[in-house]
Amino acid sequence: MSVPTVAAARGEVAAPGRQSITLPAGTLHLEVLRASEPLEALCGFATRRNPKRGFLFVSRVLGKHLPVRPSRMLAVHRRLAAALEAELPGPLLFVAMAETAVGLGQGVFEAYLEATGREDALFVHSTRYRVGTGATLGFQEAHSHATDHLLHLPEDAAQRALFDRARTLVLLDDEMTTGNTLAGLSAAYAAHNPGLEQIRVATLTDWSLGAAESLEVRLPRPSRRVSLLEGRYTFEPDPAFVLPAMPRLDGSGERKDTRLRGNWGRLGQSGPVRVDVDALLAPLRDLEARQRVLVLGSGEFAHPPYRLALALEERGLDVHFQSTTRSPILPGGVIQCALEFEDNYFDRIPNYVYNLRPGDYDRVLIGYETPELPAGHDLPARLGAEPLFF
């Protein structure tokens, strides 16, 4: 029997309501049923460059497509973590969805550990890249621009034991529409671990209440959902809209062990990420409090650069954070401009950064997990940015 859904905030301040958003690809009709903040404070809307789905919920608090103050992100992480019961049956396995929700998931995981003092929890995020021994659970995201997800099994013996015997699975994503991806992942994990007892789903915005079949029915164990906003949607495509050609977004499929030498979450993390801020900043010219600073994550590598941005903000700097992405979005709606460039993972596929124009910031710092950059990756030069290799 499933437990009812709840909004993550203790007080629900935003009134329910309906609205329609006109996008180049069609009209998005929304009904907000429950929210802790007004819809416009949590997300905007844009058009996917994707024939599978013509719209996109663009979070204003995620730190992915739009710049966000790190302290705002931290507050969101803590609110979602607080909505999860402190006494969930352990061990607990937190899984975040690549690429968009990797940073969110790791932030909620760390906030949950901080709030509860639990020591029987493990974090892992799905990925597009093959690393480690190659032992994985696979599943798909049907509406995504890149459908194949991999969930690597931890190589550390203690972490692998926790992964294999978790009693509670916590799934984390930025938004939920159909719930198909999370249902597929939970089914794959339940088959791997029959001892799983229950599931929690944590998202920023949950639009799945209009799905033909509720998520609870499709999940293999009793479940509960938490979010900052709940509602339902329908999308009315514009038959006159012509979608531009879809870029090639599939990687080479090669193993990335030589490219991705650190484990920032793909192979499991049992505690907070440690970032040596002073060591990272040592090669840079002095950062001054009056400077406007943007810290950019790169692709799936979002949480460590966010931690750097948060540390800089705590030191009094004027800091925003966002990340590059392989998600192609058409300018329009909340997306004002797009910069396309070659990825830094040696796949030679297009990546993007949105709503970033010359002169927006005095300093741009880009965090990379790859120890070197491909010759074709010219993002630092085009932004006048300073690369930081974690």
Image (tube, rainbow, N blue to C red):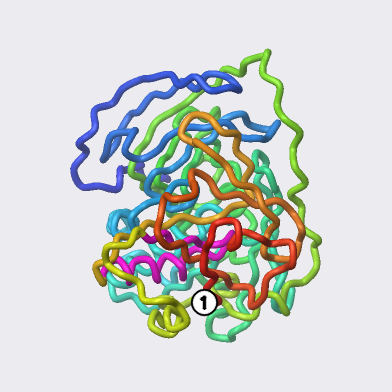
130 w.r.t. 274: above or below: above
Residue corresponding to mark 1:
162
Q: Secondary structure at mark 1?
A: helix
Residue 21 on image: x %, y %: 45, 21
Q: Nearer the viewer, residue 97 or 298?
A: 298
- Name which quarter of the figure residue 266 lies in: bottom right
* Quadrant occupied by the N terminus: top left
Q: Nearer the viewer, residue 9 or 328?
A: 328
**What is the total number of numbered labels drawn onto the structure image?**
1
Residue type at tag 1: Leu
Residue found 35% across the figure and 28% down from its top: 32
Residue found 38% across the figure and 19% down from its top: 19
Task: Decide if residue 390 is on the left or right side of residue 306.
Answer: right
Task: Decide if residue 18 is on the left or right side of residue 175.
Answer: left
- Name which quarter of the figure residue 294 lies in: bottom left
Residue 370 on image: x %, y %: 64, 73
Task: Decide if residue 85 is on the left or right side of residue 261.
Answer: left
Residue 326 on image: x %, y %: 64, 51
Answer few, some or many: residues within 10 Å of disc 1's Cα (few below 14, many 20 plus, some between 14 and 19). Answer: some
264 w.r.t. 342: above or below: below
Task: Decide if residue 47 is on the left or right side of residue 346.
Answer: left
- Check residue 308 for magenta coloring: yes
Residue found 70% across the figure and 51% down from its top: 350
Q: Nearer the viewer, residue 164 or 114?
A: 114
- Name which quarter of the figure residue 232 lies in: top left
- Check residue 387 for magenta coloring: no
For the record, the magenta segment spans 293-314
Residue 90 on image: x %, y %: 41, 71
24 w.r.t. 174: above or below: above
Q: Residue furthest top?
A: 240
